[in-house]
């Protein structure tokens, strides 16, 4: 399970689109290379909470006299909360069987940085403390949302593959004969058929 060759051999019975759904994009592919016990949605959620906690060290040092006990308390709270949300996402997905859904990276990825900047401004008393709730939401939402939408369903599929089950057994893809489909449209025009086949070979 720890190498690409291992995954390829276990996913050989799936189509390319099904493999992509299981392995996902760059971030999910990194997580999928980990042992399943380590990449559990609750652990991924806790890891995100820990990363957010590390980012908060500097604002706490700058604004709090006794910053370390307060930071430890908030870091533990953030990590535990994110882990619980990951566990809930796992339980919900185990019940619903929902497939992974894409997340909008252009919206999701900048959110923690915006939240961190806003929280820093609040600690420096440049921004109003009334914005603190929104700062924490921007900081914490991306991780649990990614786990719920993409990773928890993907982790369930990976577990099924490891157990030798076919995760898409109820959603078998129907392979369409493209040449037959195209021929019905263009008729016997061999030149158009050659152009279409050329495009197919480039995909």
Image: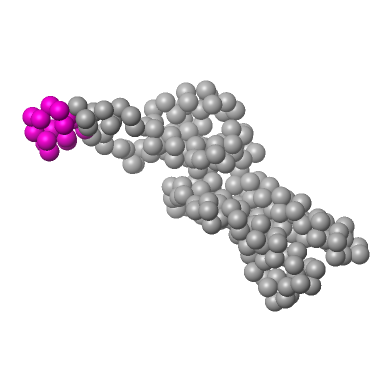
Q: Is residue 133 above or below residue 179?
A: below
Image-based side of 125 in relation to 116, left or right: right
Q: Position of residue 45 (x, y in %)?
A: 64, 50
Q: Nearer the viewer, residue 99 or 111?
A: 111
Task: Reply yes or no: does residue 200 show up in magenta.
Answer: no
**Residue at x-position 65% and y-position 46%:** 43
| Quadrant of the snapshot with the C terminus | top left
> Farthest residue toward the left?
188
Q: Is residue 133 above or below residue 152?
A: below
| Quadrant of the snapshot with the N terminus | top right
**Residue at x-position 8% and y-position 33%:** 187
Image-based side of 67 in relation to 95, left or right: right
**Residue at x-position 57% and y-position 41%:** 27
Q: Position of residue 117 (x, y in %)?
A: 70, 62
Q: Position of residue 61 (x, y in %)?
A: 86, 59
Q: Nearer the viewer, residue 22 or 106?
A: 106
Q: Nearer the viewer, residue 153 or 120?
A: 120
Q: Main secondary structure of the magenta part?
A: helix
Q: Can residue 153 be seen from the camera position used here?
A: yes
**Residue at x-position 26% and y-position 37%:** 174
Quadrant position of residue 193: top left
Task: Reply yes or no: does residue 182 show up in magenta.
Answer: yes
Quadrant position of residue 13: top left
**Magenta stretch?**
178-193
Q: Can residue 97 be seen from the camera position used here?
A: no
Quadrant position of residue 18: top left
Q: Nearer the viewer, residue 87 or 185?
A: 185
């Amino acid at each position: 399970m720890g190498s690409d060759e291992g995954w390829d051999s276990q996913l050989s019975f799936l189509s390319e689109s099904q493999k992509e759904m299981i392995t996902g994009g760059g971030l999910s592919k990194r997580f999928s290379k980990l042992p399943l016990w380590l990449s559990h949605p609750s652990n991924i959620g806790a890891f995100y909470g820990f990363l957010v906690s590390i980012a908060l060290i500097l604002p706490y040092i700058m604004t709090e006299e006794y910053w370390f006990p307060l930071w430890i308390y908030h870091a533990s709270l953030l990590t535990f909360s994110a882990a619980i949300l990951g566990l809930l996402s796992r339980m919900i997905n185990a019940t619903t069987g929902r497939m992974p859904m894409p997340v909008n990276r252009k919206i999701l990825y900048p959110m923690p940085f915006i939240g961190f900047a806003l929280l820093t401004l609040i600690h420096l008393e440049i921004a109003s403390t009334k914005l603190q709730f929104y700062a924490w939401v921007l900081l914490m939402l991306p991780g649990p949302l990614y786990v719920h939408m993409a990773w928890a369903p993907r982790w369930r599929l990976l577990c099924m593959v490891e157990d030798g089950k076919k995760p898409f057994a109820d959603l078998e893809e129907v392979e369409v004969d493209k040449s037959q489909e195209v021929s019905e449209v263009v008729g016997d025009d061999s030149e158009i058929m050659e152009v279409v086949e050329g495009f197919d070979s480039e995909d």
